[in-house]
Image (spheres, rainbow, N blue to C red):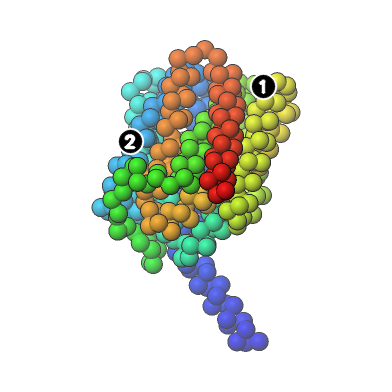
């Protein structure tokens, strides 16, 4: 019995102290720190007196600046290592939150600076983050499972953050909210400094754009993210603003983020451990269900359904996002293309949203146009996936 206990204690110790679990702890602190305030940013801009059009311009600047910065982040990972790039990205968002109170001046310049800092953060953090995640999974077969675990960890942090943020905003001040956020973001750096057995600086293989996307799975996976990201922009940025326009309270926005996170926690792990064949089926189910929810949102306006739809979209979104990323990360690890995959993954998610918000900034009916755009993108996504499935089966026969 003593030997049995010693074995399990040793196994538990090595598990807790592995690079992957240290990485997870960093992600958890980071997600709480960022999500405490992130969903409130567009709302606080509106409260500060900015028009909805100006908020759309800010979002367009953020996403479009982010796109080329992903390739700068890639070069920095090669030269200085992924951990330093994550730390630089974290410092950028800390500076963003420190400058955020100055939006009350109403100057366009401060919006540009904030958009640039947010873009530096997103590109630096996520390119390095995805690279470190892929490399922190010791075996290829662990990548999918670990992706499910990590998504659950992010979702759990994403559930706590907005709830904490709403409480702070209701009972204290915006300054206290920013201080809490900065404290958690600073804490997230500490576990990264203790990683020991990870390839922080990659041995980079120069690969052309055409070579990376030469095989069908890469074309399919990244095209799926390209089209799906239009839905993300409408659902994760525009929908909370729409909810705020209906209910006019910060609690209503916090509830949106909490519901999204709760729904993602439920299925993340199961989606991560699914087989490649099952992943395709899960993704198609997710696409059809989210498309139906968008159609219902447009056709049957109802306050209760608006909140219920958030739960279902988060739930079905996991069926798309986790299997899709698991497939991308597994193939990247297999082909020795972890850094290229992380760079292209973030770029292809951000660029379509930049185009979406640039178009919305020119229009009056922001809500309806964005919701219709999300619906159309999902229809196209389903048609493209069915065509690729038919094409693949035809080649096998």
Q: CA distance from mark 1 to mark 2?
A: 34 Å
Please tell me the numbered disc located at residue 363.
Answer: none
Residue 319 image position (x, y, % from top left):
62, 45
**41 or 284: nearer the viewer:** 284
Residue at 71% x, 34% y: name it. 308
Q: Which of the two discs, 1 and 2, labels the residue nearer the N terminus?
A: 2
Neighbours of disc 1 within 10 Å: few (<14), some (14-19), many (20+) = some
Q: From the viewer's perspective, is 127 left or right of 165?
A: left
Tell me if label 1 and label 2 are in contact, CB under 8 Å: no
The N terminus, quarter of image:
bottom right
**Picture quarter containing residue 289?**
top right
Residue at 67% x, 21% y: name it. 298
Q: Is residue 9 visible?
A: yes
Q: For numbered disc 1, what is the local secondary structure?
A: helix
Residue 300 image position (x, y, % from top left):
73, 21
**Picture quarter containing residue 193?**
bottom left
Residue occupying the far left of the picture: 79
Please tell me the numbered disc located at residue 298.
Answer: 1
Residue 104 image position (x, y, % from top left):
42, 23
User: Circle 2 sits on which residue?
Assistant: 68
Q: For numbered disc 2, what is the local secondary structure?
A: helix
In the rendered image, the vertical position of residue 49 relative to residue 90, given as above or below: above
Residue occupying the far top of the picture: 364
Residue 391 image position (x, y, % from top left):
54, 41
In the rendered image, the vertical position of residue 126 relative to residue 243, given as above or below: below
In the rendered image, the vertical position of residue 247 relative to residue 324, given as above or below: above
Residue at 64% x, 54% y: name it. 270
Residue occupying the far front of the picture: 397
**6 or 333: nearer the viewer:** 333
**Picture quarter containing residue 59?**
top left
Q: Is residue 261 visible?
A: no
């Amino acid at each position: 019995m003593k030997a049995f206990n010693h074995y399990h204690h040793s196994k538990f110790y090595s598990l807790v102290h592995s690079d992957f679990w240290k990485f997870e702890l960093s992600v958890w602190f980071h997600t709480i720190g960022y999500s405490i305030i992130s969903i409130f940013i567009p709302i606080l801009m509106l409260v500060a007196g900015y028009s909805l059009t100006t908020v759309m311009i800010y979002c367009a600047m953020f996403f479009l600046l982010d796109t080329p910065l992903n390739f700068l982040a890639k070069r920095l990972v090669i030269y200085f290592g992924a951990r330093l790039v994550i730390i630089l990205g974290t410092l950028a968002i800390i500076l963003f939150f420190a400058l955020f109170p100055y939006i009350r001046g109403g100057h366009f310049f401060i919006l540009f600076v904030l958009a640039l800092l947010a873009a530096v953060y997103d590109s630096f953090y996520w390119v390095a983050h995805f690279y470190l995640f892929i490399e922190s999974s010791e075996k290829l077969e662990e990548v999918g499972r670990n992706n499910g675990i990590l998504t659950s960890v992010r979702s759990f942090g994403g559930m706590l953050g907005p709830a904490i943020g709403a409480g702070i905003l209701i009972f204290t001040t915006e300054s206290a909210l920013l201080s809490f956020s900065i404290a958690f973001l600073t804490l997230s750096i500490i576990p990264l400094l203790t990683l020991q057995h990870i390839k922080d600086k990659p041995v980079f293989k120069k690969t052309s754009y055409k070579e990376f996307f030469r095989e069908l799975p890469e074309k399919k996976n990244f095209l799926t993210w390209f089209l799906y990201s239009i839905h993300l922009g409408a659902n994760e940025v525009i929908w909370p603003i729409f909810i705020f326009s209906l209910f006019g309270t910060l609690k209503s926005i916090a509830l949106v983020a909490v519901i999204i996170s709760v729904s993602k926690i439920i299925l993340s792990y199961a989606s991560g451990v699914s087989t490649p064949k099952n992943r395709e089926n899960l993704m198609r189910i997710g696409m059809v269900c989210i498309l139906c929810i968008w159609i219902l949102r447009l056709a049957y306006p109802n306050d209760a359904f608006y909140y219920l739809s958030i739960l279902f979209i988060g739930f079905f979104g996991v069926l798309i996002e986790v299997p899709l990323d698991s497939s991308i990360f597994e193939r990247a690890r297999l082909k020795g293309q972890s850094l290229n995959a992380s760079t292209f993954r973030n770029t292809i998610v951000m660029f379509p949203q930049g185009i979406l918000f640039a178009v919305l900034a020119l229009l009056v009916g922001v809500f309806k146009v964005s919701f219709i755009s999300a619906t159309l993108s999902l229809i196209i996504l389903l048609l493209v996936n069915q065509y690729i499935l038919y094409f693949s089966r035809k080649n096998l026969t």
